[in-house]
Image: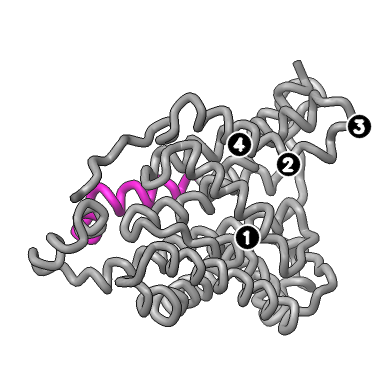
Amino acid sequence: METFIQQLINGLALGGIYALIALGYTMVYGVLRLINFAHGDVYMLGTFAGYYAALRFGFSEAEPSLARAALLLLVAMGVCAVAGLAIERLAYRPVRQASRLTALITAIGVSLFLENMGQIIFGANPKFFPQILPSRQFAIYGAATVTTPDLAILGASLLLTVGLHRLVRQTSFGRAMRAVAHDLDTAKLMGIDTNRVIALTFAIGSALAAAAGVLVALRYPKFDPLIGVTTGLKAFVAAVLGGIGNVTGAVLGGVIIGLAETMATGYLPAALNPYKDAVAFAILVTALLVRPTGILGATAPEKV
């Protein structure tokens, strides 16, 4: 029972990370019907932005505190929001009227560009994120514990997810975003600045990915310019599993993938632990065979 509870805590924390990244995938797909394969690399940029901000502010030598962690989170989110705006304006907007294959190839190209530029600028060697949160453990049940980084991940993920839901459902920008997602051309005729809506959607999704990058670094401090590859793919799996284009589905998919991965780590034989990453993709294949639109996805009528 202790093992189950510990893996449940770990899975919820990991699922919160996947959910934050998956939200960026699902938001962009919702408004443009585009899979932004560079999104995982924006998550990587967020980690590096937090790391260099910590060095610049001297946090690596200062006493760990929640306030400093929150400041780094905001800085990384701001940097990646600007990066998201630049990616949309320079890479995706020029090919918006082109075929979907062209946009897909562009997304892959942006991803490769960010990965290679990251290795050139930041160096290929791994780096270690400074400890900026107080390190504490709290007993939950027997030997099962929850750590300060776990609580930070769970709290920040919940706060950001609720904030995004309120933004989408209860603000004028959210209504404009839903209108663009429903029908881009009609939204233009209704006077909505679709370029602005799409650009801000990229910015918000990129900021959420940056938050995930810093939160992961609090728990797993070792990182490098290629950390976004596997994590980005798993978050994409989470978005598709929940129903890509559906915000609630992205969160649900992230939690399912996180729980499945940690449960596999806890209960599979040690010899199979190197293959735990395959669990997410096995779940995706199984789910798509049963429900191709994802758990909360809906079949949209094809326009002719």
Q: Which residue is mark 3?
A: 271
The residue identified by callout 4 is 257
Q: Earlier in the sequence, mark 1 or mark 2?
A: 1
Q: Does the magenta-highlighted stretch encompass residue 254?
A: no
The residue lying at 51 percent from left, 28 percent from top is 289
Q: Residue furthest front?
A: 304
State which quadrant residue 108 falls in.
bottom right
Report the amino acid beneath label 3. Answer: Ala
Image coordinates for residue 43, horizontal then vertical, percent: 59, 63
Q: Which tag, 4 or 2, sits closer to the chain's start?
A: 4
Residue 225: x and y in percent read 72, 69
> How many numbered marks appear?
4
Which circle marks residue 277 in the picture?
A: 2
Q: Disc 1 or disc 4, which is closer to the eye? A: 4
Which one is in front in this view, the residue at disc 4 or the one at disc 3? 3
Q: CA distance from mark 3 to mark 1?
A: 29 Å
Element marked by disc 2: loop
Work out whether mark 4 precedes mark 3 in sequence or the reverse, and give the earlier one.
4
Main secondary structure found in the magenta portion: helix
User: What span is in magenta?
Assistant: 158-175
